Image: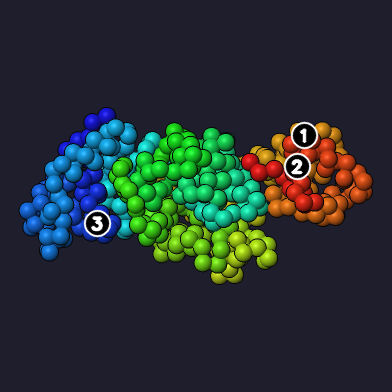
Amino acid sequence: MRLSDDERYAAGLASLGAGPNRLRRFLDGLAPAEAWASLARGEHAADPEGAYREKALDDVVDAVAASCEENRVRVLLRGRPGYPAGLSEDHEAPAVLFALGDPTCSDGVPRVTVVGTRAATPYGLGVASDLGRALAEAGVVVISGLARGIDSAAHAGALADGSAPVIGVLGTGPDAPLPRSQAILRGQVAGGGSVLSEFPPGTVGAPSWWFVIRNRVMAALAHVVVVVECHLRGGALHTVKAANDRGVQVASVPGSVRSAASAGTNALLVDGAAPVRHIDDVLSALELAIAGRPEIAAPRSRVSSSSPSEVERAVRAPNPAAATVLLALEHDPVALDSVVRRSRMQLGDVALALEQLADSGLAVCESGWWSLPRR
């Protein structure tokens, strides 16, 4: 893979450490090589103090271009072929993007961004995974930030179905060191869609504020933003703000009033976010968001009002009684008496069914509390 001159110098400009607004000004009305030469001479209007003059050295361009080619990272310029169509018209679209996989995979396809806390509960992880899987089944691109917790669960669910592309948006370089599980997921997302970043490969020590800024990309790409779990001042709220600024529909999954992980999502509901009880709520919001836009394909209709994962689990249950009890379980752990009430069965029958489900790997018990196994 060889970069063009424009791509080489664009990658060099993006490696200088300028913020997204200044990078856009660097390239305003200039080809990347012209912008680089102007900076190197200390004559660029966007750098009146000449602060980037000593940074704009040719060996910098060579190094970052070589890193992109070695890691098979594509360099995308706004307004050029290959740049994601859903992002190109945004008023804060990155002037330069770095991509693994196919950055055009979401063009003309409905898109939902799923975000939430890293410190997710089993309930939140289960909901995010189920939503990701169901959205992919409906032909919807799932976008998230590849962070631990809700982001990873949503992507894992979408990848498990595999019916639609996925997009990960990083706040680090595309080759940044990650924990093993996250690195594997990044590779799977790139293979099943695209990983996008505003940082070139080889970038070390991205400032924390970039994680806030990158959230605008997740909001700009989305037709709907869904928050699954979020603390009262959680980072997902930056994506919510960016979505609100763009008129993108925000939806929120309700959670227990006793759970700090749901304090932010419950507050969003109070403030007017659309409630998400199941996948149909997200698809309804999505259909409204893309109405009148023939360039965006409609999501595929669901064949049943029951979650596919629920149907699959019930079929795998060892007997009808166990299937009934299984449908009474959720990812949020509950006590035995709650399962009895939900299933409307006798205590002894429920206890036996739960043991059978546990033996089959379809239910788990922790300290006397029963739930569905985490994916």
Q: Is residue 37 visible?
A: yes
The residue that mark 3 highlights is 18
Which residue is rendered at x = 41% and y = 64% of the image?
245
Residue 363 is marked as 2
- How many neighbours does mark 3 have within 10 angstroms: few (below 14), some (14-19), or many (20 or more)? few
Q: CA distance from mark 2 to mark 3?
A: 51 Å
Label 3 sits on what residue type?
Answer: Ala
For numbered disc 1, what is the local secondary structure? loop
Q: Residue 374 falls in which quadrant of the image? A: top right
Q: Cβ–Cβ below 8 Å for labels 2 and 1?
A: yes
For numbered disc 2, what is the local secondary structure? loop
Instruction: Reply above or below: 106 against 368.
Output: above
Which residue is rendered at x = 57% and y = 41% of the image?
157
Label 1 sits on what residue type?
Answer: Ser
Q: CA distance from mark 1 to mark 3?
A: 55 Å
- Count the marks: 3
For numbered disc 3, what is the local secondary structure? loop
Q: As drawn, which residue projects farthest toward the top?
A: 1
Q: Is 112 left, or right, of 317 in this rendering?
A: left
Work out whether mark 1 precedes mark 3 in sequence or the reverse, and give the earlier one: 3
Q: CA distance from mark 2 to mark 1?
A: 8 Å
**Residue 10 in the image, given as x and y percentages of width and height:** 21, 45
Label 2 sits on what residue type?
Answer: Ala
**Residue 252 in the image, given as x and y percentages of width and height:** 57, 59
Residue 360 is marked as 1
**Residue 40 in the image, given as x and y percentages of width and height:** 10, 51
Q: Residue 98 falls in which quadrant of the image? A: top left
